[in-house]
Image: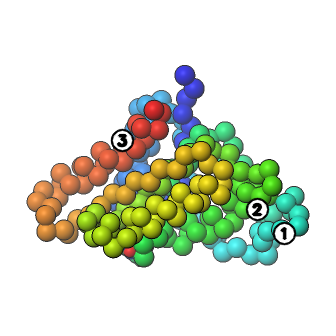
Amino acid sequence: MKTESIYFIWAHPRADSLTAHIVEEMQGQAARDGMSTTTLDLYRSGFDPVLGTEDEPDWNDSTKRLSPEVHRLFGELEGKDTLVVVFPVWWYSFPAIIKGYMDRVWNHGLAYGEGHRLPARKIHWVGLVGGSEERFARRGWLANMTDFFNGIGGYLGIEKTEVTFLYNTIGVEEDIVDRERHFENLFAEARGVVSGLAA
Ligand SMILES: Cc1cc2nc3c(=O)[nH]c(=O)nc-3n(C[C@H](O)[C@H](O)[C@H](O)COP(=O)(O)O)c2cc1C
């Protein structure tokens, strides 16, 4: 059986954040499952999320040469089965640095446009939600964000989009009795995302 190849993209200003620990748990599971992994830590890689003229698509020329950084980062996606994007939910979206990554790296003539698509077959989005699942769903954010991610997957020619939200990541909900167990459960859920990729 072919070894599953994962490309992790994650964003958090702090390297010791819960988001970072979730990524570590997922990387550990991937290693135990014999998967090959590459990780892009957007904050600490010094990635500039602002799209400038160099990376602005030329709609009439899909062969336009973009910045070396964009070609390098897009090249890293070659041969990967799954992109796993891990992020804290900020304003019912992802941090701006991820939007900038998409603007620049998933560019016209590379990830979409005539004859182009993202090299990976799957994207799995993993969002850490500060609040409760009940409120997230009741206020429409679960459907809204899931639709958004599915739409992006379709545009990029991705076969399968999966979305996992981890809830109560601030850990202050009244019904959390045992905080340690709560966070252990979140880590287990994150590890389960990785184990499920080979299925
Ligand atoms: C700028 C900002 C916006 C946020 N917006 C939301 C939000 O829209 N919904 C929510 O449930 N939590 C929101 N949060 C809380 C984060 O989701 C939460 O702090 C994070 O998932 C916890 O993981 P961390 O410790 O790795 O940051 C926000 C936090 C920040 C800093």
* Alpha-carbon span between mark 3 and mark 2: 33 Å
Q: Which of marks 3 and 2 is nearer the N terminus?
A: 2
| Residue at image coords 71%, 55% | 111
Read off the residue under disc 1: 58
- Furthest residue toward top: 1
SS at mark 3 in the image: helix
Residue situated in front as seen by the camera: 105 or 120: 120
Read off the residue under disc 2: 108
> Does residue 105 appear to the left or right of 159 in the view shown?
right
Q: How crowded is mark 1: few (under 14 residues within 10 Å), some or many (20 or more)?
A: some
**Residue 63: horizontal and vertical position, in percent?**
87, 58
* Badge number at residue 160: none
Read off the residue under disc 3: 192
Q: Earlier in the sequence, mark 3 or mark 1?
A: 1
| Residue at image coords 78%, 71% | 56
- Furthest residue toward left: 177
Give the amino acid type for the residue marked by disc 1 in the picture: Asp
Location of residue 88 (image quadrant): bottom left
**Residue 167: horizontal and vertical position, in percent?**
30, 61
> Does residue 170 appear to the left or right of 111 in the view shown?
left
| Residue at image coords 20%, 55% | 182
* Alpha-carbon span between mark 3 and mark 1: 41 Å
> Does residue 135 appear to the left or right of 141 in the view shown?
left
* Alpha-carbon span between mark 1 and mark 2: 8 Å
